[in-house]
Image (cartoon, helix red, strand yellow):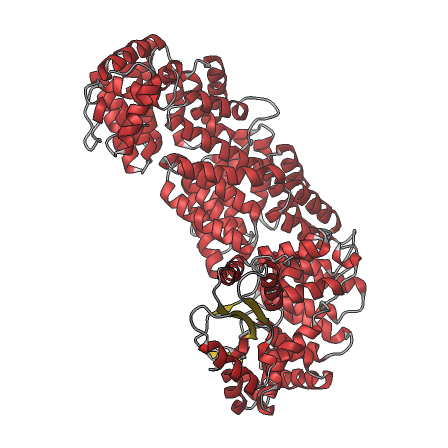
Amino acid sequence: MPPELFGRREEIAALESLVGRVQAGHGGVLVLTAPPGIGRTALVEYARGIHDGSGPRLTCLDDVHRWDHTSRTALATDLRRMSGPAPVAVLLTLAEHRTDTDEFAGLPTLRLGPLDDGAAATLLDRLTRGAADPAVAAWLVREAVGNPRLLTALVAALTPDQLTGRTPLPDTLPGGEDLLADHALRVDELPSPARALLLLAAAAGEHEPDGAGADLSLILRAGGDLAGLAPAEAAGIVVRSGGRLHFTDTLLRRAVLRRAAPARRRTAHLRLARACRDRLPRLVQLACAADEQHARLAASLAAAAAAHPSHAGRSAALARAAALTAAPEARTDRLAEAAEAARLAGDPVRARALLARVGAVPAHGGVHRVRGLLALADGPADDAKESLLTAAALLPPARARRALIGAAEAAWAMGDAVAYREAMTRLPTCEDDPMLEAYRTGMCAVLTGRTAEGHALLRRCLDGLRGVGGVARVGGTDVPGGLLRIGVAALVVGEVEAACVAGARALAAVRAYGPEVLLPRVLEHLAYAELRAGRHTGARAHALEGLRAAHRIGQPNVAVSLHAVLALAASVEGDTDACASHAAAAAAGAGPHGLAQAATLAVWAVARTELAAGRPADAAARLAPLVAPGPRRGHFAVRMLAVPCFVEAAVQVGRVTEARLATAEFTRWADATADRLAMAQLARCHALLAPPQQAAAAYESAVAHHDRLPGEFERGRTQLLYGQWLRRRRRTREARGPLRDALVSFERCGARAWADRSRAELRAAGEAVAGEPNPGPLAALTPQQQRIARHVAEGATNREVAVRLSVSHRTVDHHLRNVFAALGVRSRVELSRLLAGEAGSGVVTVG
C-alpha cells in the first residue's frame, strides 16, 4: 500500500503519469528535488506502492546527492542515453541545492515545495488524533514551516499535556535536531569566513520580524567578513537585498544557530550587542546570549519594549524578557503583554502561542483580556464576552475599561441588548474621556427606551468629527477606536453621512499608524456605513479589501460580517449568485459563533434578491421572523432596516395585517431617527397599505421625499412600485412615467435585476424598451403575454405568476390560453421546450 500523502496533488499526478508510462510498456525519468524533510522519500514509497509490477521495471534511487561525484556523473550520462521505449523507468531524488549543477540538467524535474497550512494541519490532526489544543496546533504548523518531517518531530517532542494545552509550552519548541543537522550540511561545506558570517546573520535575525532578514552593516560592524558573503550566496544559502541579508530557507537560519556550539553562539550575540546602535536590539542580543534567567536584564528589556513603536517588535522583546524571568507572576504579566502586542500586530497565532506558555492562570486579568479579544475576532461571541467580563473584574479600572468595551462589542455582535447594556453600565464614569462617557450613557439610554435622551447624548460624540483629522485624538479617546465608536453613534442616531466620514478617517489612521489588527474591522464599519448611505460600489470595494485583510490576519468573525455586507451590495446590484454565496458564507460562520447582526443582514440580503426576482412570498416568509416580535427576531440594531422590504413583500402576498403591525413599529423608529431615508421608506409603506383612492397621492408623497435625498436605489424601488400600482389599475399610460424613472434610477446605480423588472413592467405597460432582445417566437404576443409565457416556462404556477405580475389569477388564466393558441402549443411542457430551444440558440432569454 502506498503511504498517505497530504497536499501533494500535483506531485501525485506526476508520479502516476510516470508509473502509467511504465505500465504501458514505456520508460522515463523523473527527478524529485527538495530540501531535507519535505517528503522526497515518501513520494518514492508512493510510486513503489502504486506500481503493480507490470511492464518495464520502475527503479527508484533516493538521495542521489549523497553519491560521490563520479557515480552521479555516470548515472546522469546513462539516463541521457535512454531513448525511445527504454527498458526501465527511473525515479530519483536529490537535495535541492544540487539542482544548479550540470549533472542532471535537462532531465524532467519536479521541485517539491513545503506543505500549505491546510495540508500541514491535516497531517498534524492525523499525528495527534485530533487531540491537540487549537492554539498549540496552529503554533506547531507555523513553526514547522510546511516541513512534514519537522512537524512530526515537534509533535513527538511534546508531552500529551503540552499538546492538549493542560501544561505550558516550552519557550523554544524542542525537536527536529536531526533535520536541522541535514540542513546544516550545506553550511558545513563552506569556507570558515562564510560560516562565521552566516552565524552572525542568523543571530542578528533574532530581533527582526519573520522574513525581514538581517542588517548587513550590523553584521559587518560585529566583525563579519564580507569575503564570506560570495560563497554563501553562490551556495544559495542567503541573498542580499537592499542592505539586508535573507536566508533562502527559514530552517537554514535555525540550523546555523542550533548547530553552533553554545560558546560560539553566545559570542556572536555579544558581538552583535556591542555593534547595535539602538537600545532594544542591543538588549535582545544580550538576552539571547544569557544562558540563565536574569531579572535585571529582563526588566530592562521589558522597559525598552514598552517604548518600541512596532507591535511585532514589542511582542518579540517582551517574550524574550519573559523567558529570562523566574518570578511566575512577572513572567505571566510579560507573556500577556507580549500576546497583546502580537494581537495588535495582526498575529493571533503568535498571540495564542504566547498565552500557551502561561498555562492555566485563572486569576490573571491580562491573560483573560487577550483571550477574550482574540475570541472576539475568531471565536464564539459569548465566549469572548465572558472572558472579557472576567478580565474586567480582575484588572485595575483603566485596563478594565477596555475589557468592558470589548465585552459590550461581543454582546452587540450577538444581538444581546441586555448584555450590551450591562457591560456598558459596569464602565466607571469616564471623566477623563467626555466622548466615551457620552457614548456610554447615550447607548444605555437608547437601549432602555429613552431614545430622545440617548440620541442627544450620542450627538455629542459627533462633535468629535469637527476639525478632527485621521491622526488626531478624539477628545481623550484613542484613534481609530474612538472614530469607530463615533461611527456607531452616528448610525444609531441616523447621521449616515457622519458615519461615513468617521469610517474614512479611521481607515486613514489605521493605514498610516496602525494597529494592523483594526484594519478589517475599520473596513467593515466603513463599508456598512456606505451601504446605509446608498454607495453600494464603494461599499463593495471596501468590503472586499476588508475580507482579504480579515483572512490574512486571521479574523473569521469580521470576515462573516463582511460577507453579509457583500451579500447586501450584491442584492442591490442584482447579482443573485454572488448574494447567495456571500449570504451562505455569512450564515455558516454566524451560526456557530452567535453573530446575530451578520445573520440578520445576510437574511435581509437574500430576501431582497427574491423581491428583485419577483418572488414576494419567499421574501415575506424569510423576513417575517426578523421584523416581528418573538425569539427569532433580528438584531436589535438592524431589524428595522429590513421592515420596508417586508412590508412590500407582505402586501403583495396578502399578509396585510402583519405589514400594518411592522409599519406601526417602523413609524416609531422613523420618527426618532435622523436618517432621512427612513421617512421616504415610511411613505412608501403607507402607499402600499393605502386604500385605492389614497394610494396615488401616497406614492407621489413618497417620490417627493426621495427627490430631496441622494441615492438612486430606494428612489427607483418606490417609482417601480408606483408604476406597478398604476398598471394594475389599467392606467398604463400614467404608469410609464414612474417606470421609466425607475429604470433610469436602477441603471444609474448598477441594480441590474431591478432594472430588468422595470423593463418588464414597461413592456407590460405597452412600451418598447430600447436595447431589448428579439423576443423570438414570442414576437406575436403582447408584452403581458410575453411575461406570462416566460414565467410559466420557468415553472411558475398561475397563482405565482399572478403575484409576480400584480394581476389576478383569472387574468393569468385568460392570457395563458391565448399564449397556447398563438404559439400552437398544448401544454406548459411544450411551452418550456419551445423557449428553451430558442434560449439555446441565443434568440430569447427566459427569465
Residue at left 36%, top 35%?
574
- In x, y percent, where is residue 17? 49, 60
Q: Is residue 170 above or below residue 664?
A: below
Q: Give the camera-side residue of 655 and 809.
A: 809
Q: Give the camera-side residue of 829 and 749.
A: 829
Seen in the image, is 417 located left or right of residue 104? right
| The C terminus - image quarter | top left
Q: Give the camera-side residue of 369 and 809.
A: 809
Residue 313, quarter of the rendered image: bottom right
Seen in the image, is 568 located left or right of residue 427? left
Seen in the image, is 96 located left or right of residue 337? left
Residue at left 37%, top 28%?
612
Q: Give the camera-side residue of 20 and 6.
A: 20
- In x, y percent, where is residue 379? 63, 46
Residue at left 56%, top 84%?
71
Q: Is residue 263 above or below residue 364?
A: below
> Number of numbered discs present?
0
- In x, y percent, where is residue 809? 36, 10
Residue 441 in sight from this viewpoint:
no
Q: Is residue 333 above or below residue 363?
A: below
| The N terminus - image quarter | bottom right
Residue 289, quarter of the rendered image: bottom right
Residue at left 54%, top 79%?
237
Residue 372 in sight from this viewpoint:
yes
